[in-house]
Image: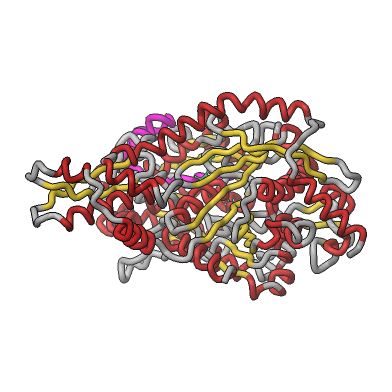
Amino acid sequence: MAEKDLKEIEVVEAEAKPAKKTTRKKATKKVEEEKKPAKKATKKVAEKEEKPVKKSAKKTIDQVEEKPAKKQTKKAVKKTEAVKKTEEEKKPARKPRKTKVEEPKEEVVIEVVEPKEEPVIEQTMEEPVIEEAVVQEVVEEVQSDLPQPRRSVAFIASECFPFVKTGGLGDVMYALPKALVQLNCDVRVLIPNYRCIPYKYKERMVYRGSFHMDLCSDGRSFYVGIMEYIWDGVVYDFIDNEEFFGQGNPYTSIVGDIPKFCYFAKASLAALNYMNWTPDVIHCHDWQAALVPVFLKTMFAPTPVGRAKTILTVHNLRFQGIYNVPTIQYWTNLPYHVFHTGGLKQGNNDANMLKGGLTFADVVTTVSTTYAQEIQTQEYGELLDGHLRYHSNKLVGIVNGIDIDIWNPATDEYLASPYDLSNVVSQKVGNKMALQEELGLDHDHSKFVLGLVSRLTDQKGLDLVNAILPQIMDDFTQVVILGTGDKVYEDSFRKFENDYKGNVSASIMYDEGRSHKIYGGVDALLVPSRFEPCGLTQLIAMRYGTIPVVRETGGLKDTVEPYNENTNQGNGFTFDRYDASLLLDAINRAKSLYFNNRWCWDEMVQRDMAKDVSWENSAKQYRQLYVDITK
Ligand code: ADP
């Protein structure tokens, strides 16, 4: 073995040792300080998790539960139910009464069969009537309800709702792990412990440990802290380091972001080794985590975590993490052979972190089937189309979903007038009026209100919007914009607000609550993107009975079926070429149906609300992928 490789192994071994000396005193001190409140938090979490068990705290049941499931509250509750049912079956026949018990934290509805009249029930429950074999049988039966086999997965990404979110990646990192837990996956999410994570979450984190990790080619080492928070069956591990994550925002400038995410990728793997948790699959997301497969297949190959398979999901090919080779070589100390053209190298002098991930990952996925095809073409390939075509045999498209509990117009606390499929036609208008009031628009519920919730960047087709907005403004139309981003769009939308006072509103800000009010209050939502890997806003719109007007690209094409007036089918209005006049035409078709055939419009509203935009199907596909690559 080359001397260099040996050195690398030593580096990795060193990583597993808990930190003794503190070179980053500040960071360590912080972690230690956090130990105190963290203890309280642990107690809180533990108490919460105990609740469901307490609810059904009959002696016999407690005994049964002590044996198998220790961690998974939900599973324990299900088992309790199953045991109860078994007991019921043993008794003489009586009419069952169904009671719905809601478990608030986990949002599980459990049907408990209770006896109706017989008063002997308490006595019977006191007796340890269930034999070991019966218990085992019941437990196996309950477990067999879950898809098998079980898989463990570590998610590694730069953001995750509700801790930190700048776009769709944050939504996915929250909703997909949660959906996978329901499918018998053991999921851990690793994200940076940014300063901007709200205190209400920080105070619940528990200090899990720390160590020092060699990172740079000159031997510079860095502190790695692990703060943990368990929520909804998912374990969140926050990689802690003041020096890298102490600024306000997750992303600052490329100069600062390159070292930050070189560190993050390596620290995440070292943390998994430190915690002695080797997942079956490591699922990394976007360029910020793209070096994970590269580290895994080189420096970490001989360590425990080295046996994991890797998946890299591309949420947006435009962002790749490109910088000159010497800098990335310095910040990773990766062996020279990975900096070749088939690996990280791009052009003459640059290293491309995403490209490295695409090369070394076992599987590459992207967030819709159409985008998976598009990125292999020159038009959408962002200079990586050749590389992607070369790796096309490991490229898969799986469309995103949305979390239908968070995005639920029936329970949405931001809405003035919550509604569901049965009353959307009469209730939704209440939200339109509340929105007009809040934004200072003319109060007129008969107007056609068009919304736009978006990062304000070139990707989102905003030059098309700028080009046609004056043509859609008439006495019957209002436009509501929410977004931040490029100055050119922020300024143009502010100008439109001024030009069309009372009928155009431009909220140049990031505001989660306002986005909910817009989805619930407008009639149609614009998503005219130049390219769109998946897009979540059109899915959220449909869930809220708001008709999407989209360009047929990427995930927009895969999720919005064009309205066909002959068959009265479809979910929204679409256009194909990136052309302002086609966008205008699509908006005019929408307006025409809205004003001339409200019956058909309302049917489409209801059809959209009934459409399955949840994670259920897609999470199953990811699960299958995990199983397939770990056979
Ligand atoms: P992208 O990830 O390219 O930004 P997506 O459509 O995948 O686009 O996801 C955008 C997510 O960010 C959605 O949840 C949307 O509601 C949210 N969002 C975008 N801009 C804002 C904003 N200004 N305020 C609140 N939420 C926003």
Indicate the quadrant containing the N terminus: top left, top right, bottom left or bottom right. Answer: bottom right
Indicate the quadrant containing the C terminus: top left, top right, bottom left or bottom right. Answer: bottom right
Q: Position of residue 157 (x, y in %)?
A: 63, 49
Near-viewer residue (339 or 558): 339
Residue at (46% x, 53% y) in the render: 181
Q: Position of residue 337 (x, y in %)?
A: 86, 64
Coloring scheme used: secondary structure
Query: Left or right of 153: which side holds 608?
Result: left
Q: Is residue 527 visible?
A: no
Residue at (32% x, 70% y) in the render: 566
232 magenta-colored: no
438 magenta-colored: yes
Q: Which residues are magenta?
A: 432-455
Near-viewer residue (168 or 486): 168
Q: Is residue 383 visible?
A: yes
Query: Left or right of 106: which side holds 341?
Result: right
- Figure label count: 0
Residue at (57% x, 41% y) in the render: 165
Residue at (68% x, 26% y) in the render: 30
Q: Position of residue 233 (x, y in %)?
A: 46, 46
Near-viewer residue (496 or 253): 253
